[in-house]
Amino acid sequence: MEPFAKQSAGNGSVTLTLSSWTERYPQLSAGFTTRLGGVSAEPFGSLNCGLHVGDDREAVVANRRRLAGALHIPFEAATYAEQVHGKEIQVVSRALRGAGNDSREKALQAKDGFVTSEPGVFLFALFADCVPLFFYDPIRRAVGLAHAGWKGTVLQIAKATLETMSAAFGTKPRDVIAAVGPSIGACCYEVDDAVISRVDKLLPELPGSGNGTEGSSAVYERKTDGKYNLNLQQLNRQIMIKAGILPAHIEITGLCTSCRTDLFFSHRKENGKTGRMAAWIGLKEQ
């Protein structure tokens, strides 16, 4: 069953709520935006949330304000970072609440993962094919969000996020639920030997990843032209399992950003000139 459910807000923005979580945990807000319902002009039409892609700054900030309104959270609670395809994780205290919501200069710098246990602090990360990873510890009421392109994936940012939650909040991986959000799927993600060589170094550490010959557990498949189709969603799932999250606690979307450019921005499909979706997670204030 698809864990993300489409919702249209009164202000026109269209989002995907992680409804399988929010129905169980009403204090939690989590999900992923679409490209629909904003004010940006083409080629960023229309709910572009990225300040770094060449779009008009005022339009992007208006889109971010529209998104906060759709989520029924204060714009001042939305916290953004400058992402660099690494594995550095930021513990977001209330003092950092709202960083980067209207300016790249004020964003959390050089971070690709964020965790918090503070109600009223909402974490946002930007995507246009890379994999959004969501984490929630319902015992200690802590949340995490990570941005995993192929570089962040092989650096095991999922593991780094869990380790940071454990150190900061006492999180135990077996208590955590996780979700892999909309991103480019194995159907569309073609890579070369340089990427696969990095993946191959990681595979022996992982449970049941395979090398393209083990059916549904495989993380890549070799093509006749010598290239490979890589399944970043499955690879991140295996890294989560290795880090201690129970397989039954991990949900994966069936949505591919490259297949569905009617719904999503896709950096690869649109040749790099496109907008960004935002993933978000946070705990509501009582």
Image (cartoon, rainbow, N blue to C red):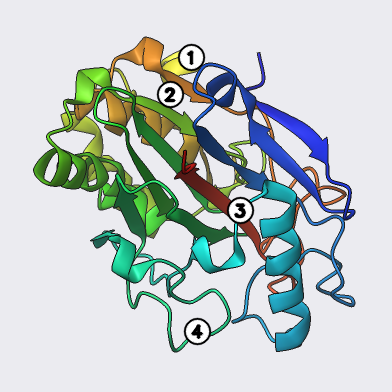
* Res 215 label: 1
Residue assigned mark 2: 218
Q: Which amino acid type is shown beneath numbered disc 4?
A: Arg
Q: CA distance from mark 2 to mark 4?
A: 38 Å
Q: CA distance from mark 3 to mark 4?
A: 21 Å
CB under 8 Å between callouts 1 and 2?
A: yes
Marked residue nearer the N-terminal end (3 or 2):
3
Q: Nearer the viewer, mark 3 or mark 4?
A: 3
Residue 63 screen position, x and y as percent: 75, 69
Residue 96 screen position, x and y as percent: 34, 69
Q: Secondary structure at mark 2?
A: loop
Residue 109 screen position, x and y as percent: 34, 78
Residue assigned mark 4: 104
Marked residue nearer the N-terminal end (4 or 1):
4
Residue assigned mark 3: 73
Identify which residue is drawn at 24% across, 62% down: 88
Marked residue nearer the N-terminal end (3 or 1):
3
Counting other residues with Cα less than 10 Å from the Cα at mark 3, is it few (<14), some (14-19), or many (20 or more)? Answer: some
Q: Which amino acid type is shown beneath numbered disc 1?
A: Gly
Task: Place residue 50 in its image quadrant.
Answer: bottom right
Q: CA distance from mark 4 to mark 1?
A: 43 Å
